[in-house]
Amino acid sequence: MNTFEHKNLINSEVKNQKRKSLFRSLIKPVEAGAHGTLNYVVKKGLGKNKIAKK
């Protein structure tokens, strides 16, 4: 590997790390049960009208 390729590899890795850290900081936590996200009712299939678990 020559010096040019090595520098490009390091620069691309630095850019990826910055992008990943920015993306992680933008993710907001959610509350379980907010806006109907808890206790889903199965509408079709064998477990019809039952509350879905994990």
Image: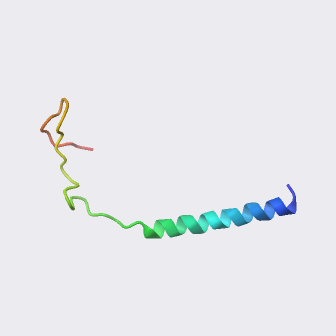
Task: Write down the quadrant of residue 36 in the picture.
Answer: bottom left
Q: Observer-nearest residue: 26 or 31?
A: 26
State the residue at coordinates (73%, 64%): 10
Q: Residue furthest front?
A: 44
Residue 49 placement, left or right of 22: left
Quarter of the image for the N terminus: give it: bottom right
Q: Quadrant of residue 47?
A: top left
- Residue 2: x and y in percent read 87, 58
Query: In x, y percent, where is residue 41?
Result: 16, 44
Q: Residue at x 23, y 55 (%)?
A: 37
Which quadrant is home to the C terminus?
A: top left
Residue, x 20% and y 60% (percent of image)? Answer: 35
Give x and y (percent) for residue 16. 62, 63
- In the displayed structure, would residue 9 be above or below residue 46? below
Which residue, as the protein is rendered here, is positioned at the far right? 2
Q: Position of residue 45 (x, y in %)?
A: 20, 31
Tell me if residue 22 comes above or below residue 48 in the rendering: below
Q: Quadrant of residue 5?
A: bottom right
As drawn, the residue found furthest toward the left would be 49
Q: Classify residue 34 as left or right of residue 9.
A: left
Q: Is residue 14 left or right of residue 33?
A: right
**In the image shown, does 4 or 33 lie closer to the viewer?**
4
